[in-house]
Image (cartoon, rainbow, N blue to C red):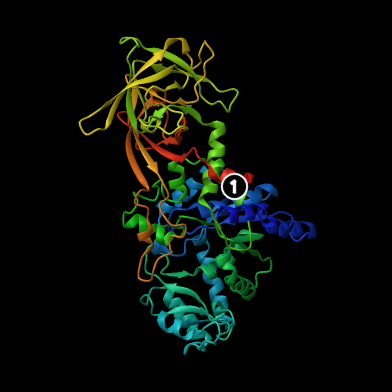
Amino acid sequence: MAEEIKKVLESDEKSSSNFIKAIIDADLESGKHKAIQTRFPPEPNGYLHIGHAKSICLNFGLAKQYGGKCNLRFDDTNPEKEDVEYVDSIQEDIAWLGFKPDKVLYASSYFDQLYEWAVKLIKEGKAFVCQQTLDEMRRDRGTATGAGKESPWRNRPVEENLELFERMKNGEFNEGEYMLRAKIDMAHPNVLLRDPVMYRIRKVEHHRTGNKWCIYPTYDFTHGQSDAIEGITHSICTLEFEAHRPLYEWFLEAIGIEKRPQQIEFARLNLTNTVMSKRFLKKLVEEKYVSGWDDPRMPTIAGIRRRGYTPESIRDFAEKIGVAKRNSTVELALLEHCVREDLNKKADRFMGVLDPVKVVITNYPDDKTEEFEAINNPEDENSAKRLVSFSKELFIEREDFMENPPSKFHRLAPGKEVRLRAAYYITCDEVVKDAAGNIVELHCTYDPETRGGWSSDGRKVKGTIHWVDARNCLKIEARLYENLFEMEDPFEVEEGHDFIENMNKNSLKVVEAYAENNIRNLKPGKQFQFERVGYFCIDPDTTPEKIVVNRIVTLKDTFSKTLKN
């Protein structure tokens, strides 16, 4: 999989938004447009995910690059699925990614105009009121290789259609009794143009228009006209809407809109070990497989933000994968690589121990505490320094000690000397175990002549390990996250089975850990590195009594090797 992604990154299709920019360049050079206007048009029926982030970066990025404008437009035509909560979360996500819409608009603002256009099409014999049920309509639609069958009500008189449509608007019929359909061609090779639905009855309160309407336009009848009203020049959407483009253009032409936007499709983002459908993400939330839309294991922007990803890393990820015309799957490791690259440059370093074993330095004074100076970020020449306390009792990672080590083990072992990061050389003299044979304590001696981690006599040790002062540290809760799904394709299941069965049972591990006191005042969302362990951030669940941290990613980056090879 990594080799496939490398090929995509190195291919001509990799350069960000190349074919779309070629279209825009040609349009500007020809004088077709003096400036570009894009839009990001989410439906407020759920939280945005990383795939939407790609579209956000593309639409807002192109507008910025060409000195144009980008609107945020909520395509709010399905009131039973939409909520103000989602409207607010979408605006928060866009702002977090670093973008500001030129205007915040709603398709519902155009309901009056859309209704007028629907009446116009009825008057011109291009739309009719149908009494078929949805099942009957789907039955008669036909197949890709066979023509459909016309509705028995397709040739209603215009006046009757107008009367029925107005009565639909006035709430005189029940849901499903009537619908308004475009009159196109039941033998059209594109089944989407076989008399598609334009309006349906929904007696549901709308989050903006309240109960003013009980009929709502479909996405296909709303989208192109909304683009036209807003003066959108390039309507950029994902490949699943490619088949909708002829219908998009049919409505614009049938209504008589002269200055028409151009729909351009690009490949949507697919990530390994990830579900990217709102419907399935909603299932995870509603059936409580995760703690909510912002669960740090979720691919939602809210979840990614809470986990500790930076907006810069998401924008870099979108740039690296570029824009293509063919669907492909991107390895999750690339996203992780992007956040490591970003945090390596700007995240402060601290010491934390996730799986502690106590070290007692037997020849260190009982009542002594001293401090060592450490650089917050060695990658930043202007980085500040901090003081880290040290005493007789320490915690080290359990994996940094081995009682019977192999020859190439360069950490602590009986009779072996290692360097404590920025502190002293220590040697393990005794291993203390409990009745069950578990190691509970290590007794060591230190060399006072090695203060700062360097020997005055020139001797060297190969191993350096991190530590925390057991007498002067913070007990914290560390949430260690892994992939939510074990398989690269979560939907690779046998017939009769559910994608839920592929969930990783170890996707979250909560441990009691210890950290140096310097993280005490970090605010929720602040990212940092626990040296030799990984990148973390402070979780919003943190209270004055308990600090909670989320692991963003480990330090090991296998993807960077793929890019270098």
Residue 334: x and y in percent read 55, 48
Give the residue number, with chain letter if any, for mark 1: 562
- Please tell me whether residue 12 is drawn above or below residue 94 in the rendered image: below
Residue in the image at 37% along x and 56% along y: 503
Residue 474: quarter of image: top left
- In the rendered image, the residue lying farthest to the right is 30
Residue 288 % position (x, y): 31, 54
Q: Amino acid at mark 1?
A: Thr
Residue plotted at (33% across, 54% down): 289
Q: Residue at x 36, y 60 (%)?
A: 500
Q: Position of residue 160 (x, y in %)?
A: 48, 85
User: Quadrant of the rendered structure where residue 312 is?
Assistant: top right
- Residue placed farthest to the front in the image? 407
Residue 258 vs residue 291: left or right?
right
Q: In the figure, 539 relative to 506: above or below?
A: above
From the viewer's perspective, tell me whether residue 186 is left or right of residue 407.
Answer: right
